[in-house]
Amino acid sequence: MPEYGRGVQMMADMAVQIKDRAERQRCAQTIVKIMSGLLPSTASKADNNHRLWNHLARICHYQLDIDYPVNIVPQEEVQAHPAPLPYPMKSIKRRHYGYLVEQALDYAMTLKDEGMRHYVTESIANQMKQDLFFWNRDSMDNALVAQDIKRYSAGKLQLDLDNFSFAPVGESALQHSDGSKKRKRKK
C-alpha cells in the first residue's frame, strides 16, 4: 500500500519473521501506531482503528500470526471481484432514435386522451430531432421526423407541421436560451 511507504512495508515484513508471538503482537501494535501517524487526516474517522488493522493484514499478505483486536476482512473477500452486471440485450429497430424513443412511441399509441397523445407526440418529435442532430446533421429535417412518426406508429400518430414548431437543437438552442444571437467575446 503506497500511502504508508516502504518503511512500513519493511517493518511489516520484519514482524512476520519474529518467532515470539508476544513480541510479534507488540511489534504489530507499534506498526499500527506509526501508520496512524502517517495519515493524521483519517485519525478522526470512526472506523480508523479497524481500517488500520485491515491494512496491516493486507500489507503482510495475511501471514502475520497475531491476535487482531478487530475482525479482519478475509483475503478471499478482499480479492473477490464483483459479479458482472447483466446487460439488457434489446434489439433496437431504429438505432438512430434509440430504444427510449421506441418505448415512448409505443406508449403514445396506447393513450386514450387525444390532448395527452398530441402532447406526448410533440415531445417525442422534439427528441427525435435532437437525435437526428447528434447522429447526422445533414438528415435533420422536420418533414422526416413527421414522416418517421407516422411510419413507426403505423399511421396512429400524426404530427401536424403547420401547427407545430420544433424546439431549437444544437448551438441554436444555446443562442435562443439566453435571448441573444451574438456571442460575447472576451477582452
Image (cartoon, rainbow, N blue to C red):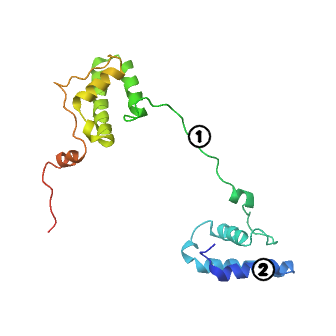
**In the rendered image, which residue does mark 1 sit on?**
86
Task: Tell me where residue 8 appears, x and y as whole percent.
Answer: 67, 80
The residue at the point 27 percent across, 41 percent down is 137
Task: Tell me where residue 52 appears, x and y as whole percent.
Answer: 66, 71
Please tell me which residue lies in front, 156 or 119. Answer: 156
Q: First in sequence, mark 2 or 1: give its number.
A: 2
* Secondary-structure class at tag 1: loop
Which quadrant, please, contains the N terminus? Answer: bottom right
The label shown at residue 159 is none
CA gap, disc 2 and disc 1:
44 Å
Please tell me which residue lies in front, 6 or 20. Answer: 6
Q: At label 1, which amino acid type do we have?
A: Pro
Marks 2/1 in contact by CB < 8 Å: the verdict is no
Note whether residue 143 is visible: yes
| Image quadrant in which you'd find residue 142 | top left
| Image quadrant in which you'd find residue 184 | bottom left
Q: At label 2, which amino acid type do we have?
A: Ala
**In the rendered image, which residue does mark 2 sit on?**
15
